[in-house]
């Protein structure tokens, strides 16, 4: 161990004092030669003893420096160990000089030299070993060889010190005899010694003052370092005691974690960990790793005072005393939340780039691809290296290069491409059409573009255009045919009505002329002619109505069916006559429909129910509505004659009748009109029946918007008995 400055000055003071005493003894030699001689031998003995003590200290210091080197790895200790070996060699030489007048001591010195030589070789061998920080090699301090060598050296030094002590006692006794003669000189020597002591004290005091100034400067430096740590805002830097409790707190820790110094000091640092992580003992494991390895570095989620989480990178370092005992821990934490989020965004962006089915690319203003995603390889068949190996314009169809060049120049000027189509070459020689959108990065001189393969879409569009042209052509043909059919209908109506009027007129004239002088058969023939003409007129009227229903414009308005149905029932009083009919009318909702067309539907269905219940007494007719998801389903049910369901497919055809005309009158067009009207409204029509068990006719209408959906009047179950 190195001596301090004060120790060196104390030793120097003693050396000076010895020299001074020797000088005083020399001055007294003229009068007291015997006393001087004895004093010299006493001094000589002290010097030998001091040399022995100094040798013992040198060996101990060599051992200490060797330990310090193995413990710390400090090269200063390794150099000090080398100096110690040189000092020991010089000491042996000096000691031999001091005891050259004493054969016994010289023999003991000869026995000591090999032991010292072996000890120094042993120490030199140990210092060549690599340092082991934090612990002392057992090979260097506790082996039997080292212990035996040091014990042998110590034994011989003790023997030599004993001999010198005995000599000192003998010479001191002889010196005491001459003390009275040398008293004066002793007093003088004492005065001189005191003076030299005061001088030494002055120098020592100055040295201590210098040490205090150095320590003060060190404390100031430490304070500056502490203040520097306190003002760092980007890092949470704080100290933990050996148990993991917070001992200090800087402004960066306050900013990142949200705790003020007075709130957190003394609390265990596990408070910064999420509860689930803390329960698994992760904080304690981190401290244990720092104890064992000196340092622990890790990342993970941490919790602020307000409960929010942040991603932290933390380093925990163990701090120890010189003797290796644990002082505490220094912990440095950095908030990496934004960095982590940025990495996640980059990762998602890269994943989107790699997995997108659209073709994505980054191209430079120099006309070359910088990067393409795998969709390019999958779509065109070229490898990524091939796509990056030539200007991108070379992959564009020659006929599309002009428009591609124009769009590229526009983006290089700062513009943006919303949509641009061109064709690109595939490895198999085919051309595929793409729709492009792209934006420039003027600062980096790059273009970011995406392309969607619309080859099949373009083919479909071409087919659609062809079909549209064909449809328009057929529409024009159909419109012309409809106009011709309308003209034909009105022409037929006009041409047929004239003969019917003639037939009816001549039948009336004939009846008036014969004036009852006609036999029964002839009258029946005339009645048949008149009835046929009347039915022919009704048939013409129904055909015109059917024709108009297909061409008339549909005008939807809110309609309340209940009031309309009551009007239709009232209009049928003449046909009902004295029949008894039970009407069961349910609650009907308001619908959106063409008023005239919907009236025609209800008139036909209710009229049929009245007609086909003619054999029943009483007749029962029910009108109801059922609400479904997107539509209203209306039904008209009766207990009439019904029909066979195997002929239900004929019900809604023109001129289709399931009963003989002599049983029930009609033209066979009414239900066809119902179907056409309901279909134009977006609904459905169907029927259910059984022979002699009645029939039910259904039709549906789409539900109107909720704001217009209201219920109609509830007529309840009523019974009307109208006398003819």
Image (spheres, rainbow, N blue to C red):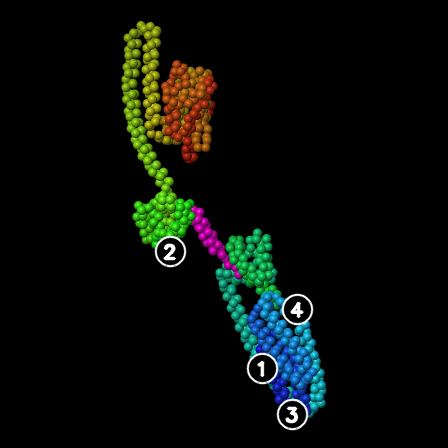
* Rendering coords of residue 517 (x, y %): 31, 5
Give the quadrant of residue 295. Answer: bottom right
Q: Residue at x 54, y 71 (%)?
A: 219
Q: Which mark is residue 202?
A: 1
The residue at which mark 3 appears reads as: 29
Q: Are marks 4 and 2 in contact (CB under 8 Å)?
A: no
- The residue mark sitting in front, 4 or 2, is 4
Q: Are marks 1 and 4 in contact (CB under 8 Å)?
A: no
- The residue mark sitting in front, 4 or 3, is 4
In primary-sequence order, the first of circles 3 and 1 is 3
Q: CA distance from mark 2 to mark 3?
A: 100 Å
| Of the pair 475 and 2, the residue shown nearer to us | 2
Question: Start and end of the magenta stretch?
Answer: 332-356
Specify the principal SS of the magenta part: helix
Q: Which mark is residue 143?
A: 4
Q: CA distance from mark 4 to mark 3?
A: 54 Å
Image quadrant holding the N terminus, namely bottom right
* Rendering coords of residue 528 (x, y %): 34, 12
Residue that sits furthest to the bottom in the current view: 31
* In the displayed structure image, the side of residue 170 where residue 651 appears, left or right: left
Q: Residues within 10 Å of mark 4 (few under 14, many from 20)?
A: few
| Of the pair 433 and 695, the residue shown nearer to us | 433
Q: Is residue 345 above or below residue 331?
A: above
Q: Residue at x 64, y 69 (%)?
A: 141
* Residue 185 seen anywhere in this rendered image of the structure: yes
Give the quadrant of residue 139. Answer: bottom right
* Magenta residue check for 341: yes
The secondary structure type at the circle numbered 4 is loop
The residue at which mark 2 appears reads as: 444
């Amino acid at each position: 161990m190195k001596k301090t400055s004060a120790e060196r000055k104390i030793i120097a003071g003693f050396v000076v004092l010895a020299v001074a005493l020797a000088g005083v003894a020399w001055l007294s030699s003229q009068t007291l030669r015997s006393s001087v001689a004895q004093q010299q031998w006493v001094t000589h003995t002290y010097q030998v003893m001091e040399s022995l003590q100094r040798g013992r200290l040198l060996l101990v210091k060599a051992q200490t420096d060797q330990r310090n080197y193995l413990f710390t790895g400090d090269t200063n200790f390794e150099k000090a160990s080398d100096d110690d070996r040189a000092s020991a060699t010089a000491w042996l030489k000096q000691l031999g000089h001091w005891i050259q007048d004493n054969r016994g001591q010289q023999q003991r010195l000869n026995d000591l030299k090999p032991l010292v030589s072996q000890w120094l070789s042993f120490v030199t061998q140990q210092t060549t070993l690599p340092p082991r920080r934090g612990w002392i090699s057992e090979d260097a301090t506790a082996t039997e060889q080292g212990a035996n060598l040091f014990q042998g050296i110590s034994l011989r030094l003790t023997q030599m010190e004993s001999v010198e002590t005995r000599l000192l006692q003998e010479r001191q006794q002889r010196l005491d005899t001459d003390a009275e003669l040398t008293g004066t000189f002793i007093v003088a020597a004492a005065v001189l010694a005191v003076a030299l002591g005061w001088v030494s004290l002055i120098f020592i005091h100055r040295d201590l003052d210098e040490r205090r100034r150095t320590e003060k400067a060190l404390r100031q430096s430490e304070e500056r370092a502490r203040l520097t740590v306190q003002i760092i805002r980007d890092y949470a830097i704080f100290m933990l005691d050996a148990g993991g409790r917070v001992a200090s707190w800087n402004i960066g820790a306050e900013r990142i974690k949200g705790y003020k110094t007075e709130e957190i000091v003394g609390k265990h640092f596990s408070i910064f960990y999420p509860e689930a992580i803390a329960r698994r003992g992760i904080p304690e494991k981190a401290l244990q790793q720092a104890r064992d390895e000196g340092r622990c570095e890790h990342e993970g989620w941490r919790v602020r005072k307000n409960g929010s989480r942040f991603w932290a990178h933390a380093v925990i370092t163990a701090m120890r005393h010189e003797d290796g005992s644990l002082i505490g821990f220094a912990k440095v934490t950095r908030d990496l939340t934004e960095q982590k989020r940025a990495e996640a965004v980059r990762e998602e962006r890269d994943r989107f780039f790699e997995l997108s089915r659209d073709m994505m690319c980054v191209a430079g203003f120099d006309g070359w691809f910088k990067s393409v995603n795998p969709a390019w390889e999958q779509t065109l068949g070229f490898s990524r290296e091939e796509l990056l190996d030539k200007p991108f314009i070379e992959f564009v169809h020659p006929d599309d290069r002009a428009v591609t060049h124009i769009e590229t120049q526009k983006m290089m000027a700062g513009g943006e491409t919303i949509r641009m189509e061109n064709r690109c070459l595939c490895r198999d020689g085919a051309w595929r059409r793409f729709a492009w959108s792209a934006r420039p990065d003027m600062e980096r001189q790059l273009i970011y573009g995406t392309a969607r393969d619309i080859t099949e879409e373009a083919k479909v569009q071409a087919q659609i255009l062809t079909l549209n042209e064909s449809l328009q052509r057929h529409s024009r043909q159909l419109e012309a045919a409809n106009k011709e059919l309308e003209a034909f209908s009105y022409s037929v109506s006009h041409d047929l009505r004239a003969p019917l009027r003639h037939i009816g007129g001549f039948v009336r004239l004939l009846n008036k002329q014969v004036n009852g002088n006609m036999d029964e058969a002839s009258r029946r023939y005339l009645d048949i002619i008149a009835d046929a003409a009347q039915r022919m007129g009704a048939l013409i009227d129904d055909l015109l109505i059917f024709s108009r229903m297909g061409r008339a414009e549909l005008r939807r308005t809110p309609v309340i069916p209940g009031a309309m149905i009551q009007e239709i029932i009232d209009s049928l009083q003449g046909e009902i006559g004295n029949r008894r009919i039970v009407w069961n009318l349910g609650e009907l909702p308001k619908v959106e429909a063409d008023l005239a067309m919907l009236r025609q539907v209800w008139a036909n269905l209710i009229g049929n129910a009245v007609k086909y219940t003619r054999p029943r007494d009483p007749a029962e007719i029910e009108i109801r509505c059922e609400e479904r998801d997107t539509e209203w389903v209306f039904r008209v049910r009766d207990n009439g004659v019904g029909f066979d369901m195997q002929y239900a497919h004929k019900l809604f055809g023109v001129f289709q009748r399931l009963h003989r005309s002599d049983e029930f009158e009609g033209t066979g067009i009414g239900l066809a009109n119902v179907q056409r009207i309901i279909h134009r409204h977006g609904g459905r029509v169907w029927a259910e029946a059984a022979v002699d068990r009645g029939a039910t006719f259904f039709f549906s209408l789409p539900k109107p918007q909720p704001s217009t959906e209201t219920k109609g009047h509830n007529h309840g179950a009523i019974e009307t008995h109208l006398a003819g």
